[in-house]
Amino acid sequence: MSPRIRVPALAALLCTLAAAPAFAAVDFTVNVDAREVARGLLHVTQSFPGRSGTVSLSYPRWIPGEHGPTGPTVDVSGLVVRAGGKVVPWRRDLVDMQTIRVDVPSGAKSVEVAFDFLLDNGTEGFTSAACATPNLLLLSWNEVAFYPTGGKSDALRCEASLTLPDHWQHGTALESGPASGATIKFRSCTFTTLVDSPVLCGRYFKTVELAPGDSVPVRMRMACDSEEGLNIPDSQVEAMRSLVREARGLFGTQHFHHYDFLITLSEHTAHFGLEHHQSSDDRGRERWWLDDDLRRSHSNLLSHEYVHSWNGKFRRPVGLATGDFHTPMQGDLLWVYEGLTQYLGFVLAARSGIRTPDEARDALASVAADMEAHRGRGWRPLVDTGTEAQLLYGARNSWEYARRSTDFYDEGLLLWLDADVLIRTLSKGQKSLDDFCKRFHGGPNHGPEVKPYTLNDVIAALQATWPYDWAGFLRQRVYTVQAHAPTNGITAGGWRIAWKDSLGPIQKAREVANKTVEEGYTLGIRVDDKEAKILDVVPHSPADDAGVAPDMKLVGVNGRKYSSDVLRDAIAASPRSGRVELLCENKEFYKTYVLDYRDGSRHPALARDNGVRDHVSEILAPHAK
Ligand SMILES: [Zn+2]
């Protein structure tokens, strides 16, 4: 038996809508008119059962998967509330900015709410960032719906509709009811399900079946700013079908009735992924499928979000399973929620062929070297990057090597590789983290459900997989400050970090896609190539020792105007010159910094250690029959 999150229907609702009339088949409706999406406007109307007295409504604040209070309240505009056919004044709570109240006159059978949602054009902020162009829209329902204050989202039933521009198609995990012109009416569902089920729609749209003939359909739905961008190569379709088989093999089960990858392909939306139980919101560049560097730079996204259906949506830390959108979340177990997902997404991308073995090893070398450069581990334990995640997601990039950021992703990958290789080593190959996953994420497919866990549940499942001092293992790596990144999984897995004078395929793809130059392992700087700006400086590196700081403009290198080639030529020549000079502009003031560096070009790579069993290759090899 699994302790599902279930709240007695309407219990919490009674305090705000005590006299909800019996005619209400649902607790509220949400109708979105997206025909002005090209202008960045969504027109919203909502209807709630009426009663006399004060009615309190709230706008979702804490957004699942974003792990923070990121609901874009400031983009609600033109709010008008009517009751009994008359406009009634609303007032905002003085402390809770997401909650409004209205006094409803007696006899009003409903409360009607109308507002515009103003779509953001910025690229920072996850779902509240850019999600639309004149050709497409990713609709997140939490942005267009108030709900009765205090209501538990599993207990609230709602009915939604969406009106699209002419000739647009759509995809979503929601069940559609009868169509009515350009308006799609969705079957009533809980508010949890609605918020968990975004809709992708657009003029240029394509659906690809990933589990043809299977009783549990899995599909890719893609909306793009061009028709050309939808031309996914057959080899990538095959890799995605393999991902579905490999994930089912890894967990031994699924916890969804159907699954939709909702893939936005645009240069004008934010680029990230957000997990849902039966779908994922995956936003990439327009030419993701056409450009090898862009494809490689996105090559961990879809497997990561897919894993979340098991790890994050089905199994969820108690502190993140809040049951509504107002209770503050606690992120101290994000090294499991996101860290294990980052590891399993990395593993499945390799097993499925989304990444070649060479690409997978390159990604692993890059993560290990990058985490080693994050020296903030010496003052802040890994757990704290999760605890403070609600702030760290929005923190600026500068001083990240010193401050740490949301390191529970990539350090989590190294941590769980360490655990996987340890289980394989101790059990002499009998057991692996695959067995842990079948135990921790297994069970029959009841469709979407939440089974919360604590730290002790994680330790117990590891212990049941193979006996070991797992509490001590985690205490050292997660809860204690450390000098170095946890790279035991690489070395005990048969490989070691080596250095090459050229970029690996994933490193090159990321530099091309992100327009950055990574020299954290030589001079100790990361450069924004487009803006010719120092993004960050590694503590105790030659750049740090010389006094270079983040946000300085990189004007010249060794007396010549900056370009990435000029910088890399200077680094390559450093064994002969014994130094690299950087001319930087710091708030209108110029200074030349002389960096004591003579080790030449260095880019991380993995080299095989023939004396140790190659667990890493065994982990990354295809498993599904
Ligand atoms: Zn994630």
Image: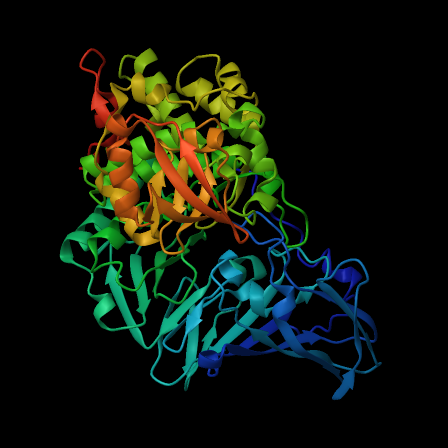
| Picture coordinates of residue 530, whole percent (x, y) | 36, 56
Name, please, the residue furthest toward the left: 234
| Picture coordinates of residue 214, whole percent (x, y) | 25, 53
Residue shown at 79% from the left, 58% from the top: 95
Name, please, the residue furthest toward the front: 559
Residue shown at 28% from the left, 54% from the top: 215
Quadrant containing the C terminus is: top left
Residue 21 falls in image quadrant: bottom right
One can see residue 321 in this view: no
Question: In the figure, 39 relative to 312: above or below?
Answer: below
From the viewer's side, name the closer residue of 318 and 492.
492
Left or right for 6, reference 34: right
From the viewer's side, name the closer residue of 578 and 53.
578
Question: In the figure, 7 relative to 39: above or below?
Answer: above
Residue shown at 66% from the left, 64% from the top: 59
Residue 85 falls in image quadrant: bottom right
| Picture coordinates of residue 607, whole percent (x, y) | 21, 23
Please, which colouring scheme is shown? rainbow
| Picture coordinates of residue 225, whole percent (x, y) | 32, 72
Left or right for 78, reference 282: right
One can see residue 144 in this view: yes
Question: In the figure, 250 relative to 60: above or below?
Answer: above
Residue shown at 75% from the left, 68% from the top: 100
From the viewer's side, name the closer residue of 201 and 23.
201
